[in-house]
Image (cartoon, rainbow, N blue to C red):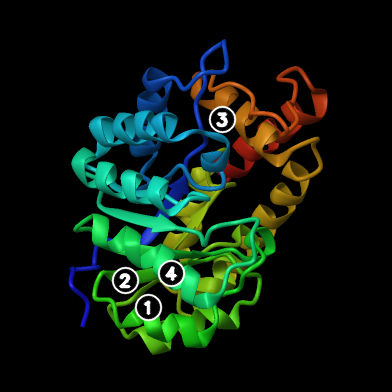
C-alpha cells in the first residue's frame, strides 16, 4: 500500500543541468531562471541534482543551494524531485531532510557507487533516506553507470516500504519497465530513463520520463508525450526517430553534458556554464553545435 498519492508523477520531467557562474560556482539566480524557463515551455516537473545535474560532482552544500533555488522558483507549480544519492549514507540522509525542508515533492537516489556493496547494504542505504524525510522515494536504477542493476529480489523488499513509490529506470532493457510496473501495482510510478526509447518505455508501461536530453529540446518530448496520450502512434514513432538522431549528434561532442548546456544557454539566453571537469567543455561557437541548435529549433517549428 503506497503511503502517498502518486497521481502527479506522470508526464515529462526535465533532468535539470547544474547552473554555474563565471567562476564555476553554483548560481542560484541562473538555476531559478532556468527552472522558470522550463515552466513556461510546459514541463510537468524537474529532476534536480541527478546525473545530468552533475550531482556527484557537487558537494552537499552546493546541492542544497540548487534544490532550494528550484523549489523556491517553481515548487508551487511544478513537481520537483530531488536526487540525493551520495557515496556516503549520512550525506544522503542530510539531503533527504533538506529536500523536505525546501518543499520538494519527492526524493530519489542511486545506490552508492565505486565500492561493490551487498544488496543488504544497498537496501540499508536507501531505507535510511526514506526514514529521514516524509516524502515519496524513487529508486534510480542506472546500472551502466553504477555497476548495479536492481534485482527483482531487492525490488520486492523495497516495495515493502510504503514510502517507495517508484523507479526511475535508466536501464537500457525496456522490459524491466513492465516488470517494475506489474510488481509495483497501478499506483506505482515507473519513469523511462533512456531518452532514445521514450516511446518504447511508455508502451512498456512507463508513466512518463525523466531525461537529460530533454533539457535542450523539451518541446519535442512534450509533443511526443502528447502524441502517445492521444493515440497518434505513427506521429509518435516519426518524432521519436527524429529525437533519436538529434541525441546521436549531441553524443558526438567531447561531452554530451557540454553540448546540452551550450544549446540550453543559446536557446534560453541563460549562460549556465560548462560542465565540471573531468567532463570536457564544448564551445558555443562550434559550427557543428550551432547547426545542431538550428536543426532542433527547426524540428520544433515543424511540429
Q: Position of residue 297 (x, y in %)?
A: 60, 35
Quadrant (top left/top right/bottom left/bottom right) for the N terminus: bottom left
Residue at the top extreme of this rendering: 22
Mark found first going from the N terminus, 2 or 3: 2
Residue 195 location, quadrant = bottom right
At x 55%, y 62%, the residue is 193
Crowd around label 3: few <14 · some 14–19 · many ≥20 (10 Å): many
195 left or right of 95 in image: right
Marks 2/1: CA–CA distance? 7 Å
Residue named by callout 1? 158
Marks 1/4: CA–CA distance? 11 Å
SS type, badge 3: helix
Marks 2/4: CA–CA distance? 8 Å
SS type, badge 4: strand
Residue 106 vs residue 119, the one in the foreground: 119
Q: Are marks 1 and 4 in contact (CB under 8 Å)?
A: no
Marks 2/3: CA–CA distance? 33 Å
Residue named by callout 3? 264
SS type, badge 2: strand
At x 60%, y 30%, the residue is 261
80 left or right of 58 in image: left
Can residue 85 be seen in this snapshot? Answer: yes
Q: Position of residue 60 (x, y in %)?
A: 42, 35
Residue 214 vs residue 231, the one in the foreground: 214
Residue named by callout 2? 164
Residue named by callout 4? 167
Amino acid at each position: 500500500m503506497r503511503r502517498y498519492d502518486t497521481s502527479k508523477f506522470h508526464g515529462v520531467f526535465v533532468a535539470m543541468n547544474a547552473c554555474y557562474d563565471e567562476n564555476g560556482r553554483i548560481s542560484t539566480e541562473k538555476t531559478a531562471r532556468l527552472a522558470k524557463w522550463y515552466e513556461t515551455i510546459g514541463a510537468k516537473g524537474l529532476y534536480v541534482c541527478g546525473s545530468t545535474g552533475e550531482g556527484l560532482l557537487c558537494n552537499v552544500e552546493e546541492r542544497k543551494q540548487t534544490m532550494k533555488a528550484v523549489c523556491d522558483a517553481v515548487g508551487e507549480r511544478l513537481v520537483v524531485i530531488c536526487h540525493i544519492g551520495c557515496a556516503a549514507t549520512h550525506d544522503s540522509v542530510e539531503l533527504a531532510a533538506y529536500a523536505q525542508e525546501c518543499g520538494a515533492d519527492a526524493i530519489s537516489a542511486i545506490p552508492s557507487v565505486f565500492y561493490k556493496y551487498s544488496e543488504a547494504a544497498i537496501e540499508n542505504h536507501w531505507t535510511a533516506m526514506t526514514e529521514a524525510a516524509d516524502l515519496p522515494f524513487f529508486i534510480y536504477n542506472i546500472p551502466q553507470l553504477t555497476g548495479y542493476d536492481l534485482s527483482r529480489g531487492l525490488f520486492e523488499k523495497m516495495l515493502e516500504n510504503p514510502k517507495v513509490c517508484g523507479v526511475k529506470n535508466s536501464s537500457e532493457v525496456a522490459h524491466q519497465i513492465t516488470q517494475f510496473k506489474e510488481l509495483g501495482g497501478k499506483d506505482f510510478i515507473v519513469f523511462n530513463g533512456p531518452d532514445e526509447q521514450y516511446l518504447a518505455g511508455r508502451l512498456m508501461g512507463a508513466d512518463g520520463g525523466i531525461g537529460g536530453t530533454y533539457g535542450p529540446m523539451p518541446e519535442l518530448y512534450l509533443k511526443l508525450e502528447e502524441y502517445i496520450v492521444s493515440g497518434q502512434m505513427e506521429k509518435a514513432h516519426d518524432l521519436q526517430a527524429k529525437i533519436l538522431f538529434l541525441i546521436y549528434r549531441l553524443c558526438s561532442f567531447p561531452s554530451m553534458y557540454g553540448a546540452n548546456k551550450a544549446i540550453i544557454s543559446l536557446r534560453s539566453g541563460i549562460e549556465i556554464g560548462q560542465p565540471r571537469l573531468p567532463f570536457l567543455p564544448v564551445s558555443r561557437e562550434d559550427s557543428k553545435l550551432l547547426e545542431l541548435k538550428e536543426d532542433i529549433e527547426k524540428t520544433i517549428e515543424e511540429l
